[in-house]
Amino acid sequence: MSLEKALESISNDKVISKPIIFDLSHKSDQNKVEKLLSEKRIQHVSDDFEEQHLELFGVKNPSQVYTLTYKEEFSKYFESLKKEAPPWQHGKWVYFPWNSTLVHILPEEDFWLVRTNRNRNLINLEEQKNFYNATVGIGGLSVGSNIAYALVLQGGPKRMKLADMDKLALSNTNRILSGAENLGILKVDMASRLIYQINPYAEVETFPEGLQENNIDKFFDGLDIMIDELDSFPIKYLIREQCKKHGIALLQAADNGDNGVVDIERYDIDPNTPFFHGRLGEVTLEMFKNLDKFGIGKTITQLVGPENVTERMQGSLLETGKTIVSWPQLGGAALLNGAAVAYGVRKVLNNQPLESNRSLVNMDSMLDPTYHNSDQVSRRAEITENFRKMFGL
C-alpha cells in the first residue's frame, strides 16, 4: 500500500468518542483489556492510583493532613487496601479510544469527591450535588463548547446533551479550546472527548445532526436548563417554545469584541416571559424563516443592541463579505462567556439570586482607563447612532 493510501485509510477510520470503563477485579474485563493490549490499541497507560488515594485519604481525614503522622497513617490505610486485592484490581480503568490511552482512576463517588473538594466552600456540598446531578442542554458548540468545559471544570452536570452539525475547522480554533489534532471531526465529538477526559463518568448525549424540528422534543426530554448558542433564528424560536413548554430557564451569551452579552430568560419562573425579552418585538417562526442575509444581520444587531456593539465590531460587521469572511470572535471573549454562563447555570440550579434579563460582561469598561472619558462616551454614542440608522433601527 502506498503512503498516500495508508494515510487515507487511517484518516477515514472512525473512532468512537466515548470512553470504556473497566473493572479489573472481574475476569471478563481483564480479558477485554488484554485483547486491547494485544491489538496494540492501548499505547499509553497512566496509573497514579496511589496518589489519588493519598488525596482521598486527606479529603476524608482533613484534620490529619498537617500532622506529622499523616503519611504514616496513609501508608497503613493503603496497605490495608492492598491486602484486599492488588492495587490494579481496585477502582476503575478508563480506556479513551481516540488517544489510545488507559487510565487508572478512583470509583465514581470517590473520584467526584476528590475532584470537587477544592471547590469547597466556594460551592458547598449541597450546591455541588445539585450542580452535578442536573441535565444541561447546549445547542451550538463555538461559544457553547467553552461553556461546557467551564461547567465540567467546576464539577458541574454529569449529564449533558450537545447539539451541533458542524465539524471543527481551522478558523474555529481562534475561539474553541481544541488543537489541530481534532480538525475535521464533529464538534459534538470534539467537546465530548474533553468532557470525558475531565470526568470519565460523565454521560454525554450528542446530536450531530444539530437541533431540528424533528429532534427537538427528544433533546429537551429530561433537561433541567438550556443554553442557546445557535446562529439559526428559527431554531432559537423553537428552543424558546420548548423552554416555555417544559418550564426551564434559558441562558445565551454573545461575543462582542473582548466582551460578552449574557441573556437570561427565566421560563422556569414565568412561562409568559417574552421571547428574547421582547427585544425583537412580536416574533413568529415564519418571520424568522423568511429572513434574508441583511435581515439576519439586522436581527442580530437588534438583539444584541446597537448601543452594546463595540466600535471595532461595528466596523467588522460592515466589512463582512467585502474584506473579511465573517463576523469576528475572540478566544478570550469565548472563555469569558463560558465562565459567565457557567456561573448563571449554577445559580439557577441552586435556586439562588440571578439577573433575570441581561448582563454585560464588559472588559473595556473595567480595564480600559479611557473608556469612561467624556469624549470617548460621546464618540461611542455618535458611532452607535450612525450604526443604528444604517440598519433602520
Image (spheres, rainbow, N blue to C red):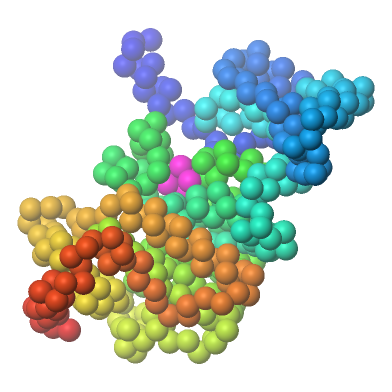
Vertical placement of 297 versus 268: above or below? above
**Which percent across, then down, holds residue 23?**
78, 31
Task: Determine the residue positioned at 46% across, 42% down.
Answer: 190
Residue 381, percent from left and from top: 14, 78
Q: Is 380 left or right of 194, judged from the image as shown?
A: left
Q: In which quarter of the image is residue 16?
A: top right
The extreme top residue here reads 1
Residue 80 relative to residue 350: left or right: right
- Residue 239 image point, x, y percent: 46, 72
What residue is shown at x 18% (from left), y 65% (from top)? Answer: 370
Q: Quadrant of residue 48?
A: top right
Q: Which residue is drawn at 48% across and 46% down?
A: 191
* Residue 65, image quadrant: top right
Asked whether the viewer can see residue 166, the reply is yes
Pick the front one: 99 or 111: 111
In the displayed structure, 35 sits above or below 125; it is: above
69 displayed left or right of 269:
right
Point out the image quarter for the C terminus: bottom left
Quarter of the image with the N terminus is: top left
The span shown in magenta is: 187-191
Residue 301, given in percent of the width and then of the height, sits at 23, 74
Q: Kindly tell me whether residue 218 is visible in this rendering.
A: no
Does the segment drawn in magenta span residue 43?
no
